[in-house]
Amino acid sequence: MATALPLSIIVPVYKVEHYLPTMLDSILAQTFRDYELLLIDDGSPDDSGKICDDYAVRDERIRVIHKENGGVSSARNSAIEEARGEYIFFADADDYLYAECLATMMGEVGGRDFLRMGLSIKAKRNENAEQLDRQKVVAHRLVADDEAALKANFVEVFTGLGNLWRCLFKRSIIMEAGLRMDTRFRYCEDQVFIYQYFQHIHSAVCIDYQGYVYFMTPDSATHDYRRIPEYDLVSTLESEWANVESRYVEPAQREAERKEWIYYELYLKMLMYALKGYLPGAAVERKERLRRWKLIRHDAWFQSLYSAKFWKPRPVRMAGFVCKYGLYPLADPVLWYLGKKNKLKLNFMQA
């Protein structure tokens, strides 16, 4: 049996030949050295797979898995099955890690079930990552070593998190709970996974250190309107978050907690789902557009979301009003015209 390692780094690879070396070089430059790097070539049609193989020849810590294209969730699942690390760290192939990132995370986790670091640094592709302003050291940490502490610090530990690359996960928890990425989703699949993982942890640590750069690539999934979520993602997030709440939050406190994070997330995704049917490349027939509005209007969470006091972008407020009062048959022709003319500007949908 293969010897266990402290850390497995999982990087799905697909059509990133121009960006992949930057990420791989940043991983190999880490001051923390005791890891394996799993590169999952998800049937990439460019030279990404060859780049993976070339790097594997250079460093024995790198293992490459070549598979047929199945999407990012399928790629990550393949790597989870192969991983040997006590902890798992997920990274995207077109981003960047600061040299002390893994050392900081592994030094802070202290055997706990979960670690989250500070917000990822968003950058344009042509920006120099080393010159970006960030929190370079741990100035604040929150430690929760039992369930009482997790409940007492629920908002800081559990809310505002939807990115895998800010986290360390324990592989034993993933395997024992049978957790995998949901291959139905190509958007927010990481959020679903995190909510499921939360239901199995007993300790956590949160730090403000920022060690990950997320490069905003125009042709990435988060910038593709066709990847705006379907309703099955919305309902899955509702269900998984309700499971998290049932374990950590008393019923009387849930309304206040929801305003911190999940209300905004769900409300945005619900109305994104309704509005995307008007957008070029994602447009659907009128009957289907009206069905989507009706589905959201009767969603069990929508009534609370509409009434709750939390910040809503102006397009979201207007769409919510249309949905709440059943005005979508009247609004539909206008929205259709704006969408057809590419004048339905929904910048709030962009990552």
Image (spheres, grey):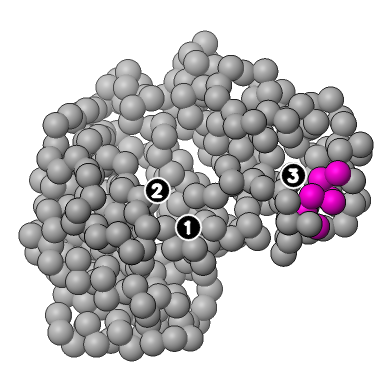
Q: Earlier in the sequence, mark 1 or mark 2?
A: 2
Label ID, residue 181: 1
- Helix, strand or loop under label 3: helix
Residue most extreme to the top: 252
Image point 62% across, 42% down: which residue?
A: 269
Q: Which residue is mark 3?
A: 274
Q: Position of residue 319 (x, y in %)?
A: 74, 34
- Tag 2: residue type? Asn
In-image side of 298 versus 63 (left or right): right
Q: Which residue is mark 2?
A: 163
Residue 48 falls within the magenta-colored stretch: no
- Tag 3: residue type? Ala
From the viewer's perspective, is residue 296 above or below residue 14?
above
From the viewer's perspective, is residue 319 above or below residue 273?
above
Q: Position of residue 149 (x, y in %)?
A: 27, 22
In-image side of 275 versus 128 (left or right): right
The residue range painted magenta reads 334-340
- Helix, strand or loop under label 1: loop
- Residue 301 in view in this figure: no
Front of the two marks 1 and 2: 2
Q: Position of residue 298 (x, y in %)?
A: 79, 31
From the viewer's perspective, is residue 203 above or below residue 100?
above
Of the pair 271 and 90, the residue shown nearer to us: 271
From the viewer's perspective, is residue 109 above or below residue 1?
above
Residue 338 falls within the magenta-colored stretch: yes
